[in-house]
Image (spheres, grey):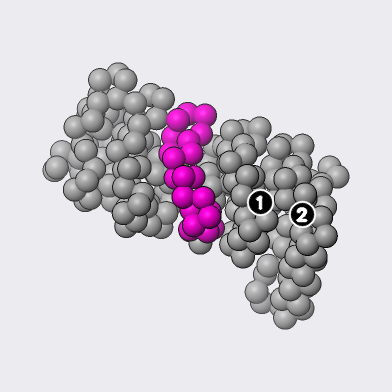
Amino acid sequence: MDCHGEQNFPENFMKLSIQLPALVRVVRLHTMFSVTDPPYNKHLYIRENFIAKLLLKTKPELVKQADNNRRTPLHFASTLGFHELVAMLLELDYSPAYSFDIDGSAPIHMSVHFGRIRVIKELLRYCPDLKDLVDRKGQNILHMAVECQQVGVIRYILQEKKLESLINGIDKDGNTPLHCASIKSYPYMVNLLVRDKRVDVSTLNRKRWTALDIARMQSYESKEDHQVCSTVSLI
């Protein structure tokens, strides 16, 4: 799932004309009625939450039901930040947490792309090993958070001792999250990472490049690249 190509995912979901599975339709209604301003929207949101609970109670198999893109209700609830619904779904069956859609994204990946920290916490509370679930590029959730510039998610991961193994994790190209920040020319992301002493700035990727090597090669292209190079050079 490309974090830049899917920024309008929740809005696009609203426009789907396909016949969605019953529970997924309820999650869509959550999207419609999650606005907090008009009081009547709050009442409708509560009503749809009740419908979701009723559906799950009478037909728990709906938890695994997916749409044409192989996205389950958990995918949508994770994307949209409905942490209570996420917990409800996981209570019944946690196996959808490990399911991938046609883009190769699991629910936790989608929650990272959209910065849904409370959802990430719920997913990891029920399924701690989800921290090691990578996408098609072999990227962990810290790689994804860096590429999508989700500062809150990055800080959460760095603060959690149980997620320490992700800090210097490598993808299929041998890139660490720091490499990704350098490749994308995100100086703030680089700064956020290198301030953590656990980040290994000397790690080589499959091309035998460190994050600093990448920054130096790109430093002539733009001001941002120069900032990245300067930041990494200070370490």
Question: How many numbered discs?
Answer: 2
Residue 183 versus residue 50 in the image, above or below: above
State whether residue 58 appears in this view: yes
Query: Label 2: few (<14), some or many (≥20) within 10 Å?
Result: some
Residue at the far left in the pictured view? 234
Q: Is residue 15 left or right of residue 3?
A: right
Q: Which residue is mark 1?
A: 93
Task: Give the structural element (helix, strand or loop) at label 1.
Answer: loop
Q: Is residue 126 left or right of residue 95?
A: left
Give residue 60's mark: 2
Question: Is residue 131 on the magenta stretch?
Answer: yes
- Residue type at the position of mark 1: Asp
Q: Is residue 21 left or right of residue 108?
A: right
Residue 217 versus residue 231 in the image, above or below: above
Question: Is residue 31 on the magenta stretch?
Answer: no
Residue 177 location in percent, x, y? 34, 39
- Residue type at the position of mark 2: Pro
Residue 21 location in percent, x, y? 81, 47
Residue stretch in magenta:
119-140
Tell whether label 1 touches label 2 (CB within 8 Å). Answer: yes
Residue 171 location in percent, x, y? 39, 30
**In the image shown, does 134 or 126 lie closer to the viewer?**
126
